[in-house]
Image: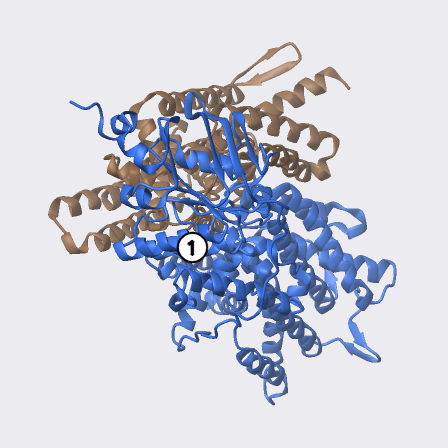
Amino acid sequence: MNTTIMLFLVQDGITNGAIYALLGLALVLVFAVTRVILIPQGEFVTYGALTYASLAAGQMPGTAKLALALGIGAFAFDLFVARKALHGRLVVRSFIANVVLPAIVLALTLSLAAQKPPVAVCIALSLVIVAMIGLYLYRIAFQPLAHTSVLVLLIASVGVHLALQGLGLLFFGAEGQRGPAVLSGAFTAGALRFTGQSITVYAITIAFIVALWLFFGLTLYGKALRATAVNRLGARLAGIRTTLSGQIAFLLASVIGALSGILIVPITTLYYDSGFLIGLKGFVAAIIGGLVSYPLTAVAALVVGIVEAFSSFYASNYKEVIVFMLLIPVLLLRSLAAPAVEEEKD
Amino acid sequence: MQSRLPILVFAILMAAIPLIPGVPPFWIVLLDNIGLAALVAMGLVLLTGVGGLTSFGQAAFVGFGAYTTAVLTTAYGLSPWLTLPLSLVVSGSLAVLLGLITVRLSGHYLPLGTLAWGLGLFYLFSKLEFLGRNDGISAIPPLSIGAFKMLSPGSIYYAIWVAVILSALLTMNLLDSRTGRAIRALRRGHVAAEAFGVHTPRAKLLVFIHAAVLAGLSGWLYAHLQRAVNPTPFGAHMGIEYLFIAVVGGAGYVWGGVLGAAIVVILKEVLQSYLPLILPGSGQVETIVFGIMLVALLQLAPGGLWPWLMSFFPERTDGRKPDTSLKLEHRTRAPAETGVLLQVEKARKQFGGVVAVNNVSFDVQAREIVALIGPNGAGKSTTFNLITGVLSATSGSISVLGRKVDNAPPQEIVKLGISRTFQHVKLVPDMTVLENVAIGAHLRGHSGPISSMLRLDRADEAKLLAEAARQIERVGLAEQMHQLAGSLSLGQQRIVEIARALCVDPMLLLLDEPAAGLRHMEKQRLAALLRELRDGGMSVLLVEHDMGFVMNLADRIVVLDFGTKIAEGTPATIKTNPEVIKAYLGVAA
């Protein structure tokens, strides 16, 4: 094998792997806190990417309207739940967070979209829009189900994925889009060429991994989030607001998803349904990491990325088959090492 | 056992539909699709709703069934009737392969694993040359009987619905049997089932294969209905949709699968044909509505529609008492059950740095009631788990009748005649008391899944139920025999656990806090029962906090504190032992 090709493939694999690592981290995060296996993670990726690309191209993204619609829905849910004990402060707070905020963002998007705002503004707007969608989705779809089993949450998650993917087609059409590079410029080291974009990908991934690891391992708040995952009732009795934990997890996941999308849309063309596959590869990494370990997930994601790069070069037809079948030996190992713990379901 | 009459009515109704003049042919097509989806959903009901194993990969098994017949009939010219068993065998054997890898995974790994191989197999279908890649295989011959070819949707309709109704019957028979009880116990965790000899990985693999074979059957029918196959209907999205169907219908009910299939297939049809009229826009609007409805349904009716529908019908309780004159053969016993039954020697269990049980030694003789007492956290339940093989000891040894049983799994321990109850009741709440207790007799029956499906297990089954009924009467719960275990009070549930343990025909009974939650009279009855069992030749080792109960009942008492044995002796000596008083009351002033 040619060393240059190998190095190139490894580099390509690491760039993709870094994205999968980010997504895998978000999945682990959401699962650890809310027990939701977040299939719509992929939609956060496409929404982030395509919102960014649309804004950069001077088009108005439909996601901004969706955020407002979901916000109104979330507000209605808040009102309904609190209908027995409505008091002004609560209503006003919910109204500001769920209706006023997305309305302002929508107005901003409407006024800025036509003038092709600079890259930084596009990124900021896209992140805010997708973050709000993630937050309101939790309120509408998952918070009412928070007490149910992992299976029910998983199926709800699939439902949300279907709805969001359909909406994605409605907003962005069937055409693929590409966005402008976040950081232009490049340099070469030996045979390899490093673009500003790929350096950004590495830097952001590493920053997130370290930050999450520190947050969950060392801070009281991170531990509170983990406690919520293990035992909701126990966490509540200890004074942890489990709803808030869920909101934070979804907020982080949607931001990470959108950010991943923004990072890859300058490198590859994304379609409204690309997110599903990208998210699933994050899943493969997350499963290898056992849905609990951040560093292991990151390493696994790199392996997935590299395997994908090599298999697309040598057996491009079987690329997806190989990536998903990578799981089988992992599952085999896990099942051999599966501890005999009792799990009470229902 | 449920009445077969509604099923007969349903079968006649389904048989009559195509004969009604004026039924649009399109309805028949829909009914064909409903039947195909119902077959897959029925497998998922057993897998997910009953067995607690979630699979997103069922569509792949449909694909195996469809492609097997497609390849064999087109490339090798085999008759479709010959490929039927082959399709089922292919789906079944691949289920064994994938199942061996996946079913041992706990909780969320399983659905994710199935999603992953579901996707992988979909891509494999669309890339393999001999499966026709993305174009698939066409010109598959129709099913035929003699000269009659099932070319139209109306003619294959009968083949599909005969398959659906037969599969439903076989599945229901399976659930209502020795194997079925083991399957239904899976969802509540494996510890209780294994304590009575159920080999849980094998039971899980069994339901996995059952579901895969039903999916393969659906695939075989699909291939001959469409007379062409391509990868699209076997992708991850269909896998998700099958699960959706099972949940909509009611994942715990065989007929819920059929109902769910009807609702989803018709709903999709309606959405596809009418939504574009209401909401003009580029495609996929039905996907959005579909997704939203899925979430809404989970929030409003998480149990599915079948139980909701059934709540309108008067509840049919099957109050027949099993014929208790039937005798179940005794467990094959070791020749001499006298002397020392159980010997625990320097047993030690460490969890990380915590020593839960610290070199504890004691024994249980034949015809003896020994109580294990101690303050909370003394290591009593852990000792139980060491004896019954739920946990393996860090060091030390445990022997039964002089034979070392270190590290033997729970299934082996129960075979030696040691049965137990649990501190936290582990019954299956949606099974009747009778069915729960019958799990205790699991090892004393021998009917397998196939004979259960074909109802060849009835003689064996009647004996098992008779034994269960006898033990329920013995513990004084005959009145509650046909109630759901979950509807009993906690104290009664503990007694049900004792009846279940008695069904093992044990020589040593391990009871973990049997008197907790009982009223005074009930405690006295329990004590009388335990004395009667001892006088009948059984030994009892019990953990209990009620000192009055223990002191009056036990022949010997072992006291643990912080994992260490601090005293052993008759109730009278224990009562005055200063170490024990110190452990319970603190240092005397």
* Residue A130 vertical position relative to residue B348 in the rendered view, above or below: below
Chain in brown? A
Q: Residue furthest top?
A: A190
The colour chain B appears in is blue
Coordinates of residue B125 in the picture (x, y in percent): 72, 49
Q: Mark 1: which amino acid?
A: Glu
Q: Residue furthest right?
A: B76
Say whether residue B480 is left or right of residue B259: left
Question: Would residue B242 be seen by someone viewing this image from the given angle?
Answer: no
* Residue B184 vertical position relative to residue A256 in the rendered view, above or below: below
Q: Secondary structure at mark 1?
A: helix
Question: Would residue B330 be seen by someone viewing this image from the given angle?
Answer: yes
Which residue is labeled 1 in the image?
B532
Label total for image: 1
Assess disc 1: are there few (<14), some (14-19) or many (≥20) residues with their C-alpha within 10 Å of its C-alpha.
few
Q: Nearer the viewer, residue A304 or A120?
A: A304
